[in-house]
Amino acid sequence: MTEQHEFDKDYWERHWHQTHHDRPGAMSTSPAHPYLARETGGLVPGTALDAGCGAGAEAIWLATHGWQVTAVDIAPVALARAAERATGSGVSERVRWVEADLTAWAPETRFDLVTTHYAHPAMPQLAFYDRIAGWVAPGGTLLIVGHLHTSDATEQGHGHGHGHGHHPPDEAAVTLADITAGLDSATWEIVTAEEQRRTMPGREAPLYDVVVRAGRRQ
């Protein structure tokens, strides 16, 4: 039977402590997801929300490229590492770190960009994407990078993306059709909708990703 995960605060604290133990320094040196630069490089920097920011690689990349970032995560240990890294990168004044449960927390304003990379909160994955989509300002951009749910990817050892050696739990994976079906064409213009297979240095199993970028209509 597949192990079920709660994805609550205790789960993520254990995850990040384990990551720090297994790969010392990884939380301070891991690069931002390659899709982030590709999908946001042509956007005019404004305000951004990184939902489930983890150790902060994406939030720091955005801040380095001119965005004013609110970065939210449930795990204090990850946020502490992220804040240290931001200070070392000279962008601490451009990032606001927020410790919060994304199933309950809500921002006071909308953002020009809302992005999430492999975040798994303690709620159904698609409901989470729908929730954060509501935080995109008119004319703004939603960028979702998630684990692709396919039997082929699972059989090939679809990577977790958080440094674990096993494939992601079923409840954390989605299909491309799942995500795009939740974006009403009256509200959203889908710009990117693709499934990607990529490899990472030092990792035997490939990663299977789903990438969706959509613009919120004015």
Image (tube, grey):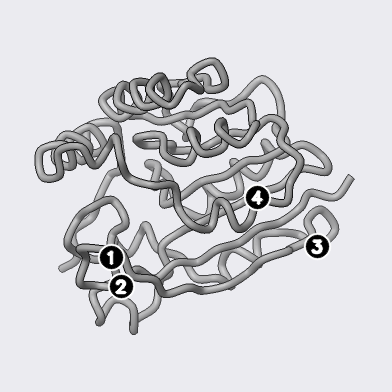
The answer to which of 175 and 38 lies nearer the viewer is: 38
Per the image, the residue denoted by label 2 is 206
Of tags 3 and 1, which is closer to the observer? 1
Per the image, the residue denoted by label 1 is 159
Which numbered disc flags the more N-terminal residue, 2 or 3?
A: 3
How far apart marks 3 and 4 lie (CA) works out to 21 Å
Tell me the crowding category of disc 4: few under 14, some 14 to 19, or many 20 or more residues within 10 angstroms, Cα based: some
How far apart marks 1 and 4 lie (CA) works out to 24 Å
What label does residue 48 carry, if any? none
Which numbered disc flags the more N-terminal residue, 4 or 2?
A: 4
Q: Position of residue 128 (x, y in %)?
A: 52, 46
Tell me the crowding category of disc 3: few under 14, some 14 to 19, or many 20 or more residues within 10 angstroms, Cα based: few
* Marks 1 and 2 in Cβ contact (< 8 Å): yes
Q: Residue at x 38, y 23 (%)?
A: 88
Q: Secondary structure at mark 2?
A: loop
Left or right placement of residue 194 versus residue 17 in this view: right
Q: Secondary structure at mark 1?
A: loop
Q: Secondary structure at mark 4?
A: helix
Q: Secondary structure at mark 3?
A: loop
Of tags 2 and 3, which is closer to the observer? 2
Per the image, the residue denoted by label 4 is 40
Query: Considering the image in quadrants, where does the C terminus appear?
Result: top right
Residue type pointed to by label 1: Gly
How far apart marks 3 and 1 lie (CA) works out to 32 Å
Q: Position of residue 111 (x, y in %)?
A: 70, 32
Which numbered disc flags the more N-terminal residue, 1 or 2?
A: 1
Residue type pointed to by label 4: Thr
